[in-house]
Image: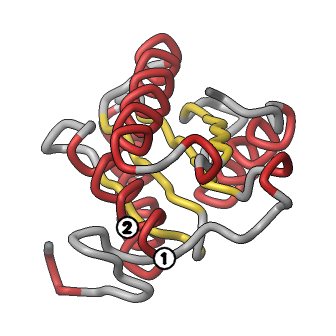
Amino acid sequence: MRGGVRSTTIGNVPGRAYWQRRLEEECTRAERYRRPFAVILITVGADPQNGGAPVSEAVTMLAAESLRRSVRGSDVVCRLAPNRFGVLLVETNEEGALTAKRRLVSNTVRDLQRCLTAGMMPVITAGHAVYTAQHRSPSTLMHGAEAALQHHAAPAW
């Protein structure tokens, strides 16, 4: 990891400061070379059927490791909040982002099911945005991914 910028690090997953720097770099790169990239936001939240108890740090760590193992070496997974992750997919168009989002959610659910009892399973939601003429800055790209995440607030699993 260049510069070693980390905050809210969990396991081998860097935090928000590293995410922000990489997102800005990727926007600049995409503009310069006209290459696509995508952002996926994933939330590992409390299951309302389980009384809405907060997700434990151990469950969050399991999800972080699952996400990290499920991406390409060129992609970036960061912890943006206690229960939120961002995945930056370099050189990825809309179709690739949808495929990656499904794979990430599926792999994370599978990995968590191996380790947790049915009553402990968190709700996983995901939303994505792709670098386009409408989403050219880091803030508009994140806003688009956040809007998609809120629109798909029903569990992704």
Q: Which residue is mark 1?
A: 57
Asked if residue 33 lies left or right of residue 99, the reply is: left
| Mark 1: amino acid | Glu
Image quadrant in which you'd find residue 64: bottom left
Please give the name of the residue rendered at 35% of the width and 29% of the height, measured from the top-left corner. 35
Please give the name of the residue rendered at 30% of the width and 53% of the height, measured from the top-left corner. 76
Vertical order, 122 against 151 (above or below): below
Do labels 2 and 1 touch, CB within 8 Å? yes
Please give the name of the residue rendered at 49% of the width and 55% of the height, measured from the top-left corner. 86
Question: Secondary structure beneath disc 1?
Answer: helix
Q: Nearer the viewer, residue 151 or 92?
A: 151
Horizontal and vertical percent position of residue 156:
66, 29
Q: Quadrant of the C terminus?
A: top right
Question: Secondary structure beneath disc 2?
Answer: helix
For mark 2, does the 10 Å Cα neighbourhood hold few (<14), some (14 to 19), or many (20 or more) residues? some
Q: Which residue is mark 2?
A: 61
Cα distance in 3D space between marks 2 and 1: 6 Å
Vertical order, 30 against 107 (above or below): below
